[in-house]
Image (cartoon, rainbow, N blue to C red):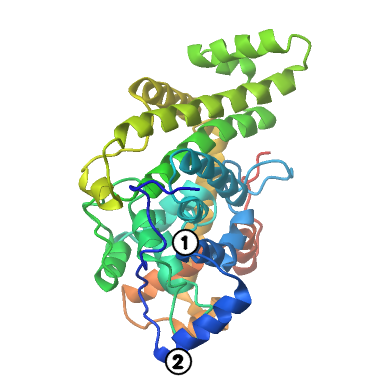
Amino acid sequence: MTRAPYAADPNAQPMREFSRTPQSESSDLRSGERRGPRSAFQRDRDRIIHSMSFRRLKSKTQVFIAPDGDHYRTRLTHSLEVAQIGRVIARALSLDEDLTEALCLAHDLGHPPFGHAGEAALSDAMERHGGFCHNAQALRTLMRIECPYPDHDGLNLTWDLLEGLAKHNGPVAAPNWALAELDAAFPLDLGAWPSLEAQVAAVADDIAYDNHDIDDGLRAGFLSLEDLLTLDFLADQWRAVEKRFPHAPRERLLREMIRDQIGMMVNDVIAQTAVQVRGLGSVQDVRAAGRQLAGFSPAMAVQERRLKTFMYERLYYHPEQVAAAENARHVVARLFAAYVQDANLMPADWQTRLPAQQPQRARMIADFIAGMSDRFAMQAVSAIYGEQPAGLINV
């Protein structure tokens, strides 16, 4: 497939934080032959997929905490769905699919257990130590915490991947301590807009959770068709689906409506972005544009904001969800307090690396907690305090 001139180019010798010695370069060539021919961005994607942090996403909250059913989404399945949507958009726009996919797969690696509830608890606990941000934690995870290689910390991903991950939601004017430290070690040009691949990853995330969370909300009984039909654009889609399949069961029609909504959003992004990038001759032009180029049309953006508002009112802020989130925050807060008071409660390999001074000590404790899955956090707090945390699981 022909790559657009404004796409990121894996053949342009993308930078990595840790350069290789002549001996390791020679080893790389041999291992490259053994491990198959791949572009720089394919290597990024594969390193992410093979990381422990990526595997742990299978037991981290998307909407519902540690659900009993097998059909609810987790951070892992959400990330896979984001990647599928991102690849479709990237291919239609002749962008680099591998970089887009890698960004989509990595975008939630910094989430602690229990999703945004866990993040809020860690942010509170870390208030005197610089705070906590899941976006910055994703970079910290990939650049410092994951250490599978013998000669450097982190996964040593390309600048394009790390820059896109740091700024997939736009330029960062005031980075927190974690992102500032990483940017000082490997400058990521935080004040500029990122590549189109990163911008596509961000909008693919929006499309995925806007629509797939509807599916999970319906399954759990927190949403109903009648709720959805209060949005005129969903009501229009429902009537169109009913007309096409007049004898199909309601459950199948609901899934068809959600698929249609995803398709409409994807096609809208492709058409809008194609207009925005006309005349651009390089990825440098994308970064120099000074504005978002990949995204919804103005009309679709209005619909998407209305859908988000609806989902917050009806699902994310549902009383049962709010209660579960508060209980989850309590679990994370108790874990942080316990490890601060007695580091011997942590695994031996973490104890030996724990700094004596603050704020570095608290920050490493936060690293440990942020890497936990929901179930591991529940088991850990139970082992420390001798009681099972209550009120977390509501589906």
Q: Residue at x 52, y 61 (%)?
A: 45
**For mark 2, does the 10 Å Cα neighbourhood hold few (<14), some (14 to 19), or many (20 or more) residues?**
few
Q: Are marks 1 and 2 in contact (CB under 8 Å)?
A: no
List x then y, in percent, for residue 312: 47, 30
Choose between 12 and 71: the one closer to the eye.
12
Going from N to C along the chain, the mark reached first, 1 or 2, is 2
Query: Is 107 located above or below residue 26 in the figure?
Result: above
Q: Secondary structure at mark 1?
A: helix
Q: CA distance from mark 1 to mark 2?
A: 23 Å
Residue at the spot of label 1: 41
Relative placement, left or right, of 337 versus 179 is right
Taking 287 as reference, is 265 left or right? right
Instruction: Name the residue at 21% across, 53% down.
Output: 191
Q: Which mark is residue 52?
A: none
Identify the image quadrant of residue 356.
bottom left
Identified by mark 2, the residue type is Gln
Left or right: where 75 falls relative to 246: left
Give the answer, above or below, for where 306 lies relative to 91.
above
The residue drawn where x is 70% and y is 19% is 253
Q: Which residue occupies the extreme bottom position in the image?
A: 23
Looking at the rendered structure, the kind of residue marked 1 is: Phe
x and y percent of residue 107 in the render? Answer: 46, 53
Q: Is residue 353 above or below residue 1?
A: below
Residue placed under numbered mark 2 in the picture: 23
Quadrant showing the C terminus = top right
Mark 1 burial class by Cα count in 10 Å: few <14, some 14-19, many 20+: many
Residue 124 appears in the rendering? no
Q: Percent x, y for residue 371?
A: 52, 64
Is residue 270 among the parts visible in the rendering?
yes
Q: What kind of element bears circle 2?
A: helix
